[in-house]
Amino acid sequence: MMNSIFQELLHEEVLANYINNFVISMQTKKELEEKTIWFLKIVEKHNFCFKQSKWNFNAKKILIPEIVIGRGEIQMENNKVKAVKEWKTLTKIKEVESFLWFMNFYRCFIKNFSHIARPLNKLKKKKEWKWEEEH
């Protein structure tokens, strides 16, 4: 529903929407002001209400679960990057599935994710395997 209501803002990459969080990130204060007014007009048109305690204007960085937004960038949380780097070697099908499930959320941060994950997806189809250099 929210994606259809705010479709124009999302399409113009003015607004980022994650569950019930909205983020407007612009390069200049003037741009931010203009885009915020645009957003608020849509909010008013649809009679939405937001808790004032949840508003955060002019934030330098915003943490949305699993993601950090700030300075015109969207990134994975550092502890999630660390978890991936330190992930133990996969030895069972269930471990491959768990890893791919975890990584699927972050696919937008990884260029060519589906190509990179293809060998792991192939492993899921096998009953067992021996880890070799090829993998």
Image: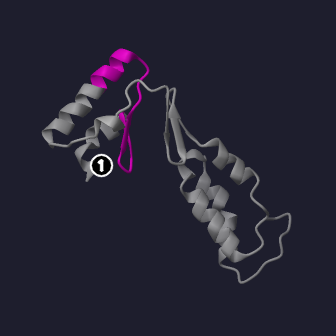
| Relative depth, front residue between 119 and 28 | 28
- Taking the magenta stretch, the answer to whether it contains residue 97 is no
Determine the residue positioned at 71% across, 84% down: 127
Describe residue 21's horizontal placement relative to residue 105 as left or right: left
Residue assigned mark 1: 3
Residue 53 lies, with reference to residue 91, above or below; the image says above
Figure quadrant of residue 33:
top left
Determine the residue positioned at 74% across, 58% down: 87
Residue 73 lies, with reference to residue 46, above or below; the image says above
Residue 121 lies, with reference to residue 69, above or below; the image says below
The magenta stretch spans which residues?
Answer: 14-35
Task: Where is residue 53? Give x, y as percent.
Answer: 33, 36
Describe residue 128's horizontal placement relative to residue 45 as left or right: right
Query: SS class of the residue under badge 1?
Result: helix
Q: Quadrant of the N terminus?
A: bottom left
**Kind of residue at badge 1:** Asn
Describe residue 93's horizontal placement relative to residue 104 as left or right: right
- Taking the magenta stretch, the answer to whether it contains residue 31 is yes
The residue sitting at the right extreme is 133
Task: Where is residue 97? Give x, y as percent.
Answer: 63, 70
Figure quadrant of residue 52:
top left
Task: Where is residue 125? Give x, y as percent.
Answer: 65, 78
